[in-house]
């Protein structure tokens, strides 16, 4: 059973930065995209950013220019560098791996709280 283990969440002041990491417990066959989603209280889970094995990225409009997604294919690890954080970025952030055979793997979630 593959597990995605996230780290790097926490409490940060507005304007601050955090870096999230997500590592798979073992290699995953036929990965299409890796990325991050988030869910704020009372809201649906939404896409934050994804990256393909070739390095193509996709971002939610709300985080463009502030967040950067990257991956290490050899380590089956994905990162999310979050800069200029805003209160509305407060959410539980989930790591995702999507495969070509349409299976999704999810992390357990890590809390990001932006507050002064």
Image (cartoon, grey):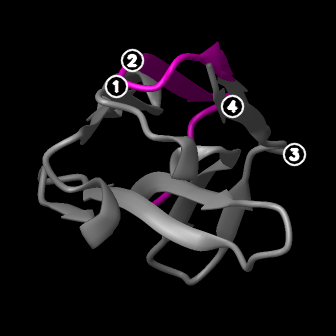
* The C terminus: image quadrant: top right
Task: Estimate the x, y position of residue 35 in percent, counting from the top left.
Answer: 45, 53
What residue lies at 25% left-to-right and 59% top-to-bottom?
A: 52
The image quarter in which residue 23 lies? top right
Q: Earlier in the sequence, mark 1 or mark 4?
A: 1
Q: Identify residue for label 1.
A: 74
Whole-angstrom CA distance, mark 3 to mark 1, is: 19 Å
Label for residue 1?
A: 3
- Indicate whether 67 appears above or below 74: below
Label 3 CA crowd tier, 10 Å (few <14, some 14–19, many 20+): few
Report if residue 32 is visible in the image. Answer: no
Whole-angstrom CA distance, mark 3 to mark 4, is: 30 Å
Q: Earlier in the sequence, mark 2 or mark 4?
A: 2
Q: Identify residue for label 2.
A: 17
Q: Which residue is at the front of the view, 1 or 111?
A: 111
- Mark nearer the viewer, 3 or 2: 2
Label 2 CA crowd tier, 10 Å (few <14, some 14–19, many 20+): some
Tell me where the magenta segment starts and ends, as one range.
Answer: 7-32
Whole-angstrom CA distance, mark 2 to mark 1, is: 26 Å
User: Is residue 65 found left or right of 6 in the rendered image?
Assistant: left
Label 4 CA crowd tier, 10 Å (few <14, some 14–19, many 20+): many
What residue lies at 69% left-to-right and 48% top-to-bottom?
A: 91
Q: Earlier in the sequence, mark 3 or mark 4?
A: 3
Task: Estimate the x, y position of residue 36 in percent, counting from the top left.
Answer: 51, 52
* The N terminus: image quadrant: top right
The image quarter in which residue 46 lies? bottom right
Tell me the element at label 4: strand
């Amino acid at each position: 059973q593959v597990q995605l283990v996230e780290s790097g969440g926490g409490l940060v002041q507005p304007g601050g930065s955090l870096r999230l990491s997500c590592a798979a417990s073992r290699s995953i066959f036929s990965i299409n995209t890796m990325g991050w989603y988030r869910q704020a209280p009372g809201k649906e889970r939404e896409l934050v950013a994804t990256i393909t094995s070739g390095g193509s990225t996709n971002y939610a409009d709300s985080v463009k220019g502030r967040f950067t997604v990257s991956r290490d294919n050899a380590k089956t690890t994905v990162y999310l560098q979050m800069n200029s954080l805003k209160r509305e970025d407060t959410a539980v952030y989930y790591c995702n791996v999507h495969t070509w055979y349409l299976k999704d793997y999810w992390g357990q979630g890590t809390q990001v709280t932006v507050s002064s």
